[in-house]
């Protein structure tokens, strides 16, 4: 297979930590030591959301709010892996394939590392790419900013897309 064009996309997402919500990242329910979860219209999965925005941004297609607006009730508590599957379908229908994805999750707690391999499996299953083409890392914010004060969790993602000839 040969490719004639490359595109890079950058995505970012942040959600507030609150009581009474599940903490879902990469399609995995994590246990927060203070029983906190991420607030949002959907399941507030910052990893999936940042990957979706990176994919859409690479092709200048807008952001996830354009496709899954919080004003639409059908997206209330939506599984972000399903939303990601809709975005990758849009990307592939335009003749693009993913070369790789690299993401970093910023959270003081809980520890993300024990969940990374399961997150990679979930994402690779949805994107239909090899597990080793997905990088997921985690870091703290050294107690600085909203993530450091444990007010929220954020994620940055970068994707490289290849146009099929």
Image (tube, grey):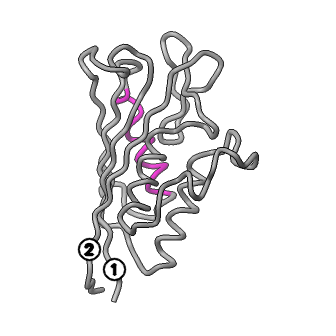
Q: Quadrant of residue 39?
A: top right
- Which residue sits furthest bottom? 165
Q: Which residues are magenta?
A: 112-125
Name the residue rendered at 30%, 39% in the picture: 104
Where's residue 74, x and y in %? 75, 49
Q: Which residue bears the numbered disc 2?
A: 6
Q: Quadrant of residue 101?
A: bottom left
Q: Horizontal and vertical percent for residue 48? A: 47, 46
Q: How many other residues sit within 10 Å of disc 2, few (<14), some (14-19) or many (≥20)?
A: some
Circle on res. 75: none
Relative vertical location of residue 139 with respect to residue 120 in this rendering, above or below: above
* Residue visible at 27% across and 86% down in the picture: 2
Q: Which residue is mark 1?
A: 163
Whether label 2 touches label 1, CB < 8 Å: yes
* Quarter of the figure with the C terminus: bottom left
Q: Position of residue 117 (x, y in %)?
A: 38, 41
Predominant secondary structure, magenta span: helix
Measuring 53% from the left and 41% from the top, which residue is drawn there? 27
């Amino acid at each position: 297979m040969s490719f004639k064009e490359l595109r890079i996309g950058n995505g970012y997402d942040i959600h507030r930590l609150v009581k009474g919500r599940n903490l879902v990242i990469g399609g995995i329910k994590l246990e927060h030591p203070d029983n906190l979860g991420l607030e949002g219209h959907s399941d507030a999965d910052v990893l999936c959301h940042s990957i979706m925005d990176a994919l859409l941004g690479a092709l200048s297609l807008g952001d996830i709010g354009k496709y899954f607006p919080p004003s639409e009730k059908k997206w209330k508590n939506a599984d972000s892996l399903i939303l990601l599957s809709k975005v990758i379908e849009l990307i592939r229908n335009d003749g693009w394939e993913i070369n790789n994805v690299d993401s970093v999750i910023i959270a003081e707690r809980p520890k993300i590392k024990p969940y990374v391999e399961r997150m990679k499996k979930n994402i690779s299953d949805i994107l239909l790419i090899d597990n080793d083409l997905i990088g997921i890392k985690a870091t703290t914010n050294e107690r600085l900013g909203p993530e450091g004060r444990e007010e929220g969790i954020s994620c940055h993602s970068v994707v490289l897309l290849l146009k099929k000839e």
